[in-house]
Amino acid sequence: MTGPDGGLVSAYVHDADLDAEATVRPKRLEEFIAQHRVRDQLDLLLQGAMRRGSPPDHILLSGPPGLGKTTLANIVAAELGSGIRVTSGPAIERSGDLAAILTSLAEGDVLFIDEIHRIAKPAEELLYSAMEDFRVDVIVGKGPGATAIPLDVEPFTLVGATTRSGLLTGPMRDRFGFVAHLDFYSPADLEVLLRRSARILGVPITDDGAAEVAGRSRGTPRIANRLLRRVRDFAEVRADGVVTLETARAALTVYDVDALGLDRLDRAVLTALVDSFRGGPVGLSTLAVAVGEQPDTVEEVCEPFLVRAGLLARTPRGRVATEAAWRHLGRTPPNGTFGANAPAVPDLFSTDADQP
């Protein structure tokens, strides 16, 4: 790419911009916005450990994606003044991989394992002794000649993160001394977060603009920061550079994010339910075919927010669009479907005399 003077202009983002993007994440516990109960509990845990001069108990963080589990793991290491080693459950396929990581840790280090529920079973068994006794047994050789070599591990703190805590085994969960669940953020908390991010990124933003972006962020900081960057692009290219209420609305319309935070796929799911299946019930596979996506994508990406927003219900017979979904799409529900005077649905325990 050439500039006005004919010289080459780098297509890469300037280092200063990359640094600004990286600094959006809080580095200390006092900078972490919302999650007040978890933050206070974690502060007590870390302060107590530092006064005793020993590593804190192992920490398990659970909750939906994008709420700050990785950020909290880095904050734990920063508060302790120790190093951090980052890996993920799917990356640890063999127990030897985990043994190599554990034996390389220095005293007091933090080991962060993201999606820990997906760790391989042999590695999970090895992790038990490391968490409790700070020791691992490495098997050398095969068959009758195989021997177990015990290796000491420096005292460390394991921080595990999971989006599906129900998939964790009981023995694994019991070995964590501190378990915390992160909840979705309120719009007010997201406004505070967006103003902080805008200040770091150098984006002028009004209170109305921050409120508008926060209201469409699904209660998730990761989505809020992503939308802020996209609104910033729109403001710089098609407006005066300031993120106002009008600019935010126009930008989010361009990026297909509506007033409730629904994107194209979310609306496609609701539209298929309402227009093609008259609100349901309809099976997951049929619904996925109707929108041209895989069933896993619809179930794991779309449905959690749609259910939480009260737009979709899961029933034994299939997915059903709620009255709020009909209203949001500007459709009128069929007569009697959601009305207060609609006849009651008979149940298995009703007698013929009870039926209307």
Image (cartoon, helix red, strand yellow):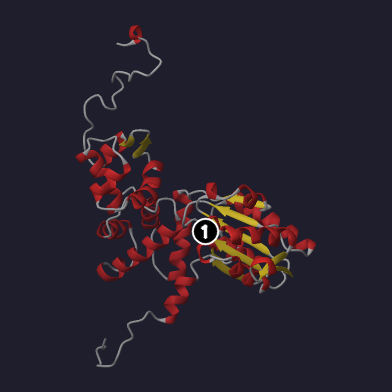
User: In front here: 48 or 89?
Assistant: 89
Q: Secondary structure at mark 1?
A: loop
User: In front here: 132 or 301?
Assistant: 132
Vertical arrangement, residue 355 with respect to residue 319, above or below: above
Vertical arrangement, residue 295 with respect to residue 141, above or below: above
- Image label count: 1
Q: Residue at x 39, y 68 (%)?
A: 203
Residue 103, quarter of picture: bottom right
Name, please, the residue furthest toward the bottom: 6
Q: Percent x, y for residue 187?
A: 44, 49
Q: Residue at x 59, y 64 (%)?
A: 112
Name, please, the residue furthest toward the right: 52
The answer to whether 57 appears left or right of 293 in the picture is right
In the rendered structure, which amino acid carries the disc numbered 1?
Answer: Gly
Name, please, the residue furthest toward the top: 353
Q: Percent x, y for residue 22?
A: 48, 71
Vertical arrangement, residue 216 with respect to residue 240, above or below: above
Q: Percent x, y for residue 348?
A: 38, 18
Q: Mark 1 sits on what residue?
A: 68
User: In front here: 178 or 140?
Assistant: 140
Name, please, the residue furthest toward the front: 144
The answer to whether 103 appears left or right of 92 in the picture is right
Vertical arrangement, residue 210 with respect to residue 290, above or below: below
Residue 225, quarter of picture: bottom left
Q: Residues within 10 Å of mark 1 (few under 14, many from 20)?
A: many
The quarter in which the N terminus is drawn is bottom left
Q: Percent x, y for residue 284?
A: 32, 43
Q: Residue at x 58, y 54 (%)?
A: 61
Q: Residue at x 29, y 68 (%)?
A: 240
The answer to whether 37 appears left or right of 90 in the picture is right
The quarter in which the C terminus is drawn is top left
